[in-house]
Amino acid sequence: MSERGVAPMLHGEIPTLFEAPYSQDYAKDIVLLGVPYEGMLVADRHTLYPPGSRPPETFYARFGADEAPDAIRQASVIYSLEHQGGIAAELDFTNISARLQIVDAGNHTLEGAEEVAEQAARSGGITITLGGDHLVPLPLVRGKQKGKPERIAIMVFDSHLDLHPSPPLWAGSQWRTLIDEGHVRPEDIIIVGPRGVRQSHREVEYAREHNVTIIPMQQIDDQGLAPVCEQMVGRLQSVDSVYISLDIDVVDPSFCPAQKYPDAAGLNPREILTMIRRATAAKPISGFDLCCFSPRYDEGQRGALLAARFALEAVYARLRH
Ligand SMILES: [Mn+2]
């Protein structure tokens, strides 16, 4: 790793994530992968379009999350592990590659991602996944729980609750599906950052009845980060590990315009990094995904760069334990 070699290419002009070696052996500490899947699209308040459709684009209904993994990989060369193994300033200048085996497993379907997550978990590893839309954590958590069953918390960063009762394979109901399948208990789901009016009564009722923890944007504004982190860590006490799912629309769109469902005045990147750090200092990370990033709305790759930085934080989280 001391000399900079030729960058490994995933396909065409696309580098691997963090320029990690490409591998189909998933018995590693960290398996990076892309899931370029975008399913049912929101058309309006009453209508969903089937997977693969391209409805007329409006500001309310945008798409393109299936283009995200490779766009984020391109920006991730800033965080290349080829750069002396990746010496992390945030971790007292730890050499990442000397401590962890990290590979990029390329892009996968939902079914393939479940298999990768299962194999990685079975050998004690984790997946760090670039979606895709927010259905992507469904197969990843399923696979993780098949490979290494344990009590997990899911810490979700999202402007929206995604607690719709149906349809079960939609990026607005994935948490309900995982609960109904028995992979996670509703009281172990923590949703950080909801804001705006794209919410529904049924989701709120479900969350209240089933003790899902919701930390709205307003609470973070009112209390500041420290008490919020304390509450969050308190909810992690009974679990074995924490899976982190980050919908990029939780971020203020001025930091990342590349969002399917942008909503003004969101969290800033360092607030999110701080919360991830606190949670994964309390419990081991059991997986990470970043979803709903749509590069066609990006400006100067600043959103892609931020997305790559969030994925890097998941690498750091694995190193902390
Ligand atoms: Mn969302």
Image: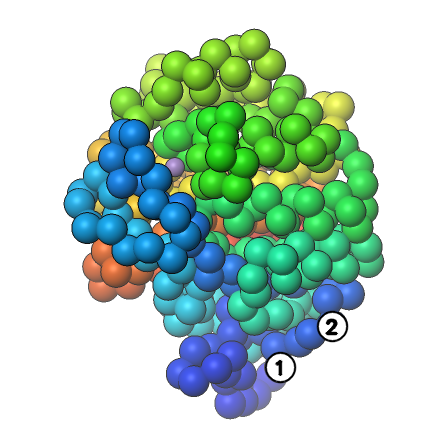
- Report ligand 1 position as a quadrant: top left
The local secondary structure at tag 1 comes to: loop
Q: Is mark 2 within 8 Å of ligand 1?
A: no
Viewport quadrant of the N terminus: bottom right
Give the number of the disc on residue 1: 1
Judged by depth in the image, the label closer to the viewer, 2 or 1, is 2
Q: Residue at coordinates 44% horizontally, 72% vertically from top-left?
A: 77
Whether residue 159 is visible, yes or no, is: yes
Q: Position of residue 61 (x, y in %)?
A: 25, 43
Front residue of this view, candidates 92 and 307: 307
Give the number of the disc on residue 276: none
Q: Amino acid at mark 2?
A: Asp
Q: Position of residue 246 (x, y in %)?
A: 47, 42
Q: Is mark 1 within 8 Å of ligand 1?
A: no
Position above or below: 50 against 238: below
In the picture, residue 64 is in which quadrant? bottom left
- The residue pinned by badge 2 equals 25
Q: Is 253 positioned to the left or the right of 304 in the image?
A: left
Q: Is 132 positioned to the left or the right of 125 in the image?
A: left
Q: Amino acid at mark 1?
A: Met
Position above or below: 198 against 283: above
Q: Is 148 positioned to the left or the right of 274 in the image?
A: right
Whether residue 236 is visible, yes or no, is: no
Q: Position of residue 234 (x, y in %)?
A: 64, 20
Position above or below: 320 against 299: above
Q: Residue at coordinates 48% horizontally, 50% vertically from top-left?
A: 290
The local secondary structure at tag 2 comes to: loop
